Image (cartoon, rainbow, N blue to C red):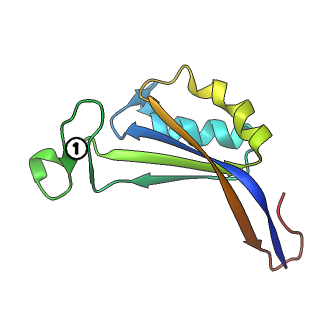
Amino acid sequence: MKTTGTALRLTVYVSENDMWHHKPVFTEIVHRAHAAGLAGASVFRGCEGYGASSLIHTTRLLSLSEDLPVAVVVVDSEERVRAFLPQLDELPGAGMVTLDRVEVIRYDADGEGAR
């Protein structure tokens, strides 16, 4: 079964070295999204990039391969994503957040469709 609709995509850009209570911030975001009942979250590690520091981090040079960029992506209804945003306020490193309206196409083998 194929279901379609609109949703909001939340992308949080952090550094892989940003920590919250001895664990990576990106892990905390995923766990908070899960606890909030959001549809799903994925973490993508960049192979090269720079942020506010303007220092380029890359996997191509061993000495610069630490502290790579990480993006946490969550897609759910606009209402649920916006209700989740305050959870990011206390996390260090969650300096840039983007929100995009997206069209969702979901294929379900069991016929239950999207949430």
Residue 29 higher or lower than 89, as above or below: below
Horizontal relation, residue 41 to residue 83: left or right: left
Horizontal relation, residue 71 to residue 58: left or right: right
4 or 32: which is nearer to us? 4
Place of residue 94 in the rendered image (x, y in percent of width and height, measured from the top left): 47, 30
Q: Residue at x 23, y 30 (%)?
A: 53
Horizontal relation, residue 110 to residue 92: left or right: right
Quarter of the image that includes the C terminus = bottom right
Residue 59 higher or lower than 38, as above or below: below
Q: Residue at x 73, y 52 (%)?
A: 7
Place of residue 14 in the rendered image (x, y in percent of width and height, measured from the top left): 41, 37
The three-letter code of the residue at mark 1 reads Glu
Q: Residue at x 86, y 77 (%)?
A: 110
Place of residue 51 in the rendered image (x, y in percent of width and height, measured from the top left): 30, 37
Q: Quadrant of residue 83?
A: top right
6 or 93: which is nearer to us? 6
Mark 1 neighbour class, 10 Å CA radius: few under 14, some 14 to 19, many 20 or more: some
> Is residue 37 visible to us here?
no
Residue 114 higher or lower than 51, as above or below: below
Q: Residue furthest right?
A: 112
> Is residue 115 visible to us here?
yes
Place of residue 3 in the rendered image (x, y in percent of width and height, measured from the top left): 83, 71
22 or 50: which is nearer to us? 50
Quarter of the image that includes the N terminus = bottom right
Q: Which residue is mark 1?
A: 66
